[in-house]
């Protein structure tokens, strides 16, 4: 059927390919069935390259990227965060890096972040398991919108008391993030000496 004939019938030909002549000839969409501009998405719109792991992040995914300890005075990973230059420190940071797909941030998706401490060396800890109910939203809970449908990035710190850990033992944090859509991501921190 020719394009002129389709126009006469109130229908238009909807090209599928990027270049003329690459679309299937039998695809016909009426104006009512054509996707609206807000519904048209390219692969770049629904996926983005994870900046930290080199994996493709889907628009409805959420994942923990990294979990590590650092001194309050610094921001880099530290395996002895409870002391600085031989002096004991009363607090240190647990740094949490995560990523979420664009759609989760757009709808302000709720998730739960679970944090706990373990000891591979058998040490005891009074660090209380934390359950944090949070939302993927720009400017809150450490989330930043990466713009241009590139998703959201989380960079947050939790202040931890050094007195929660027995001096001389080895510890490690475990984080689990569970989104309302059922997705679960888990990661562990570096081992550190209290």
Image (cartoon, rainbow, N blue to C red):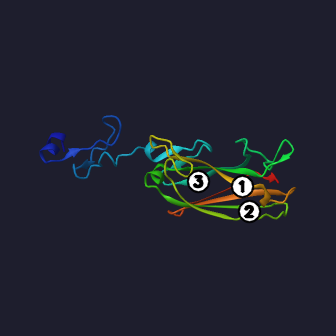
Task: Identify the residue position indicated by label 2 in the image.
Answer: 127
User: Looking at the image, which is closer to me, 2 or 114?
Assistant: 114
**Residue 119 at what x, y percent from top left?**
80, 61
In the image, taking residue 133 as reference, residue 74 lies left or right, namely: right
The quadrant of the picture occupied by the C terminus is bottom right
The quadrant of the picture occupied by the N terminus is top left
Task: Identify the residue position indicated by label 1 in the image.
Answer: 160
In the image, taking residue 126 as reference, residue 103 lies left or right, namely: left
Task: Identify the residue position indicated by label 3 in the image.
Answer: 63
In the image, taking residue 72 as reference, residue 5 lies left or right, namely: left
Q: Secondary structure at mark 1?
A: strand
Q: Secondary structure at mark 2?
A: loop
Asked whether disc 1 touches disc 2, contact meaning CB atoms under 8 Å apart, the reply is: yes
Label located before the other in sequence (1 or 3): 3
**Residue 180 at what x, y percent from top left?**
51, 63
**Residue 36 at what x, y percent from top left?**
29, 48
Label located before the other in sequence (1 or 2): 2
User: Residue 84's image quarter?
Assistant: top right
Pointer 2 local density, CA inside 10 Å: few below 14, some 14–19, many at least 20 = some
């Amino acid at each position: 059927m020719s394009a002129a004939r389709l126009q006469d019938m109130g229908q238009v030909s909807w090209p599928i390919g990027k270049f003329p002549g690459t679309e299937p000839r039998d695809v016909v969409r009426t104006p009512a069935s054509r996707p609206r501009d807000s519904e048209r998405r390219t692969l770049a719109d629904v996926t983005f390259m994870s900046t930290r792991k080199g994996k493709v992040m889907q628009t409805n995914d959420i994942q923990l990227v990294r979990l590590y300890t650092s001194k309050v005075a610094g921001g880099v990973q530290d395996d002895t965060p409870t002391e600085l230059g031989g002096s004991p420190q009363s607090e240190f940071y647990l740094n949490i890096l995560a990523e979420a797909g664009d759609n989760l941030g757009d709808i302000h998706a709720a998730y739960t972040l679970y944090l706990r401490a373990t000891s591979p060396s058998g040490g005891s800890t009074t660090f209380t398991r934390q359950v944090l109910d949070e939302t993927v939203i720009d400017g809150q809970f450490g989330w930043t919108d990466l713009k241009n449908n590139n998703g959201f990035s989380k960079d947050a710190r939790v202040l931890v008391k050094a007195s929660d850990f027995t001096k001389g033992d080895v510890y490690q944090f475990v984080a689990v993030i569970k989104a309302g859509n059922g997705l679960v991501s888990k990661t562990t921190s570096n081992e550190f000496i209290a």
